[in-house]
């Protein structure tokens, strides 16, 4: 079972799928997403 979509299935308006993947992969390695979510305010009432 899989969740999400294949990178190749992303709409072309976002750019080339492999460029998006490379950026995502680099950001993941550098913990960019972790740091962004740490900076976001925490709201306990968000569902």
Image: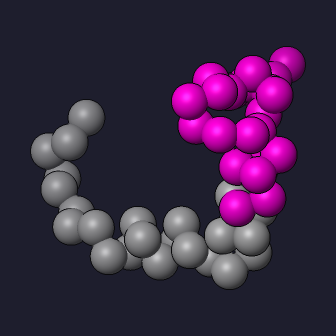
The percent coordinates of residue 10 (x first, y second) are: 68, 27
Asked whether 37 or 47 is in front, the reply is 37
Q: Is residue 10 left or right of residue 41?
A: right
Q: Nearer the viewer, residue 36 or 12?
A: 12
Which residue appears at 62% of the width and 24% of the height?
A: 11
Q: How many marks?
A: 0
The location of residue 32, given as percent across then percent down, is 56, 74
The answer to whether 26 appears left or right of 33 in the picture is: right
Point out the stretch of residues depicted in magenta. Answer: 1-23
Q: Position of residue 17 (x, y in %)?
A: 76, 39
Q: Residue at x 54, y 66 (%)?
A: 33
Indicate the position of residue 25 as horizontal and vertical percent values. Answer: 77, 62
Residue at position x 25%, y 35% from top? 47
Q: Is residue 21 magenta?
A: yes
Of residues 10 and 13, the one nearer the viewer is: 13
Q: Residue shown at 68%/80% (left/top)?
A: 30
């Amino acid at each position: 079972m899989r969740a999400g979509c294949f990178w190749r299935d992303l709409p072309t308006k976002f750019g080339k799928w492999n460029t998006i993947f490379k950026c995502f992969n680099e950001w993941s390695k550098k913990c960019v997403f972790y740091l962004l979510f740490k900076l976001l305010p925490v709201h306990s009432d968000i569902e």
